[in-house]
Structure formats: structure tokens, C-alpha cells
Amino acid sequence: MLQLGGMVPLTSIDFPGHLAAVLFCQGCPWHCRYCHNPHLLRTDVPSKLEWAEVMCFLQERVGFLDGVVFSGGEPLLQPRLLDAILEVKAMGFKIALHTAGIIPARLAKVLPYVDWVGLDIKAPFDAYKKVTGLVGSGFKAEESLDLLLNAHHVDYEIRTTVDPTLLGEEDIEQLAVSLAGRRVKRYVLQTCQKPESTVNTPRYLGENLTVLFPSFEARD
Ligand code: SF4
């Protein structure tokens, strides 16, 4: 069903307001220099978990967990993501999706069945290549953002990882203004966890951005 690189059996932070398990989908075609899960990028490796094992695990957690998070890597890369979501949803779990929006058409198919999305928006859309290494990646992310903002039943968080070696203060401000113009209701700046990033950039920038969004957070 899915090519999985691993699972976290219990989290209270990856799906706000829910106790959930996290499924890490294997594979991502982008090359963000700060990627937090580089071991999940390759697609030419066998799945670490059989889907039947995941289903057994979830069956035993009905009543204890209330959500399942599809994370990665990049879940939208999985051709059978929709089938997997439908199967998990049929067990009564709420569904969260962590994505960078790399395949908007696939996002459009799963959105009707998803309850919460954490969407990474990595840079001003015309500057995406600086972060992902791929020309045109910003247009995919922009299309996915618009799909999400038009899916009014889905709760969400838009987040940007701030790597000062890739994005300047002006980049972040330009992006934030553009997101506020689209009426994004929750925006989060995340500190890059690379060892050489010593500046707590999100909190510094956040002082200027708080007023732009109904909900804003600078997260370490
Ligand atoms: S989109 Fe996400 S998973 Fe893919 S390379 Fe970038 S940070 Fe890593």
C-alpha cells in the first residue's frame, strides 16, 4: 500500500489536539539542504513496515489513539496515499497530513478526507530553488497552498523553516506578507536544526510578523 520508512506509535504534538500515531512515508524528490529526515528521501529501498502490520497496530489502538498522521519524506509521492487514508479513516481515526505540496493534483484528491494539514511553505514562490534545488518547485507549492486554503473543512498550519544561510530576513517578510494577503490564519516559523544555524531567527523575525496573522508562532 505505502512505502514506509518508519512509524511513531504515539505523539501529542504532530496533530494538534489529538493523540496520534505517525506514519513516515519513504521518498521525496526535493533536496532541501536542511532536510530533517534525509534517511527518508530515497525511494529505492524496501518498505520498513508492511501495511498489514500497520493495520494490526491501529486496530489495537482504536479507542486509545484518535488520529493518524501521514508524514515523511513526502506522503504525496505515494501513489496509493488516498487508499491508505480511506482505510485508516474507516477505522474511525482522524487524519493529518504533513506535506510540502509537491504534487497538487494528488493533494486535491486526498483533501476531502483529511482533517488537518501541516503545509511547509519554504520560501517566496519564485525563490524556491534556493531551498529545494529544483526549478519550478515553488509553483507546485503555491498551487497546493491555494487548494488547501479553498478546502474550508480542513484545519491547517502553514510553516516555514528558517535557515539563515538560504533565506534572508527580506525573504521571510516577503513570504509572510504574501501569505497574510491570502488570509492564512495560522503561520509558524521554525528554527532550522542545522548545527551551524546559531541564530534564533524565527523568534527575532516573529516580532514583526505577529500582527499579520490571527495565529502566529515562532517555534524552536
Ligand atoms: S520537502 Fe521535506 S522531505 Fe523533501 S527534501 Fe524537503 S524537507 Fe526533506
Image (cartoon, rainbow, N blue to C red):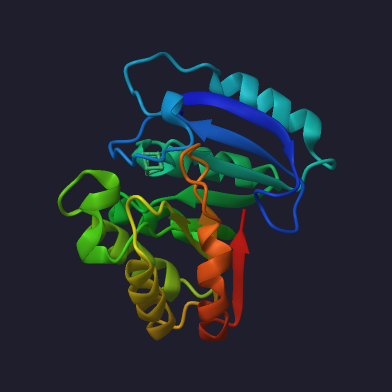
Q: Quadrant of residue 31?
A: top left
Ligand 1 is found in the corner quadrant, namely: top left
Q: In the picture shown, does residue 142 fall above or below 42?
A: below
> Where in the figure is residue 200, as x and y percent of width and height?
56, 56
Please say whether residue 154 is visible from this viewpoint: no
Q: Is residue 160 left or right of residue 17?
A: left
In the displayed structure, 32 sits above or below 173; it is above
* Residue in the picture at 40% in, 36% down: 80
The x, y position of residue 175, in whole percent, is: 36, 72
Which residue corresponds to the image point at 32% horizontal and 52% vertical from the top-left? 166
- Give the total of numbered labels: 0
Single out the residue that lies furthest toward the left.
135
Q: Is residue 135 above or below residue 201?
A: above
Q: Left or right: 117 with respect to 61? A: left
Q: Position of residue 30 (x, y in %)?
A: 29, 40
Residue 44, placed above or below residue 117: above
Q: Which residue of the protein is positioned furthest toward the top in this rendering?
A: 46
Q: Residue at left 59%, top 73%?
A: 216
